[in-house]
Image: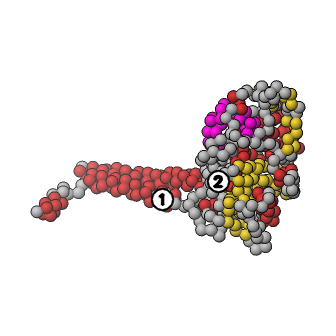
Amino acid sequence: MNVSRASSSCHDHPRPTAAGAAARGLAAGCCLAAAAALTVTPALAAAPPGDSGHSSAAPGPEAAGGSMMAGHGVLVRPKDGVPRLPSGLSALSWTVSDARTGQVLAAKDPHRKLPPASTLKTLFAVTVLPRFPSTEKHRVTDADLAGIGAGSSLVGVQARQTYTVADLWRGVFLSSGNDAVHVLAHMNGSVPLTVSQMQAKARMLGANDTHVVSPDGYDMPGQVSSAYDLAVFARAGLAMPDFAGYVSTAQAQFPGGYDAHGKFVKSFGIQNTNRLLTGADGVTRYPGVIGVKNGYTTNAGNTLIAAARRGDRTLIATVMNPQSGLPQAVYREAGELLDWGFAAAGRTSSVGTLNAATTAYRATSAHAPARTQQQAQGGQQARAQSGEHAQQDPKPAAGPRESSTAEAGSSSTLAWSVGGALALGAAGSVVLLRRRAAAKSR
């Protein structure tokens, strides 16, 4: 019964006319247009972005720095004649990368999330340093020094004393002073505001492993970073002349004043806690060392970001929590990674990149042209110019996801262009068929 009605219904359709054919032609054109949009777009959008390299490890899911960087264990792609990686590297995670190109030459578990200790101060500096000229003065209040964690490393900032911003930054980088960090954070608005800005800065730089709880790196639940992210922060910082100047300073004088007991304290010398820079405590100063920052807490163990320059090449090594138990292991392993990196650079394929966002490396005050050094070391006007330049956040480059989005957008445009052309063709068919039908009716 149903079949009969269906068959009858088919026969009951009126005989095709020119108008009906035109309508069907228009419908067919629209269908073709839609089909083109659905067919062309995936074909183009599926084209993968350029690969950053391969490694002995199987590719993992998408990760900042390239798919190879999601791998576990040691990642390296040496060519013939390249020395083997140093033996005895015991750090839970490490990277060695080229500051100028952003190439990661080798790594071990680069995205492993670990407590960063005071190496997180590099992100604090990249976020806050451009906001104040180095010559600006600030009178410290009791509130500025509130909330500092017990057992923190301190430079000796005193309430009711006036310091320049440069004094405070030397306290941050040389003595790893959490007191100086808190004063600068309060100058920036508040500690919570600074933490949120640091988190936003990390994401802007493509450092997705980092979760900021305290701006000074003090052990806090949930506060983590990674060897990859620390390299990203160091690279961004070395593009700032003041940052490079502070991290490469081995010794300085810190202002004195009246302490909490009303006793006058003379200015005193402070020394950088980065032994790879100072050569203290049995550690040999690394040739061509620039800095950058060391750290230690109970949960983090020893952490270190080390940068050094030979010729026109600057390398960054990050080392997180060596397990060997040997004295000064974090400095020894960082030095060995830098040695290997200088021997392998230009002779090995990279396993990833620090270019998730543009933090283009440029000459810094530690090894800059004369004009840049004069601006960095000049008076307040030159400082202000340097600060204004540093405040201009670089425009992020398209990472893997952004590249896919751009390709998808361009392919969608092409698809709709093709579909539109087919639709116009169908419309033209309608007009032509109507004219022919009108001519026959006459």
At label 1, the amino acid type is: Pro
SS of the residue under disc 1: helix
Q: What predominant SS class does the magenta segment belong to?
A: helix
Residue at the image point whose x is 63% and y is 45% from the top = 220
**Farthest residue in the front direction?**
261
Q: Which residue is mark 1?
A: 42
Q: Residue 118: x, y in percent?
A: 72, 46
User: Does residue 373 appear left or right of residue 118 in this picture?
Assistant: right
- Dot 1: few (<14), some (14–19), or many (≥20) neighbours within 10 Å? some
Q: Would residue 234 be visible to someone looking at this image?
A: no
Q: Which residue is mark 2?
A: 114
User: Foreground residue, 319 or 348?
Assistant: 319
Residue at the image point whose x is 65% and y is 65% from the top = 73
Q: Residue 115: x, y in percent?
A: 66, 51
User: Foreground residue, 348 or 119?
Assistant: 119
Q: Quadrant of residue 187?
A: top right
- Alpha-carbon span between mark 1 and mark 2: 39 Å
* Eye-nearest disc, 1 or 2: 2
SS of the residue under disc 2: loop
Q: Would residue 86 be visible to someone looking at this image?
A: yes
**Farthest residue in the left direction?**
1
At label 2, the amino acid type is: Leu
**Which stretch did the figure color magenta?**
178-203
User: Does residue 296 appear left or right of residue 113 in this picture?
Assistant: right
Q: Residue 252: x, y in percent?
A: 87, 40
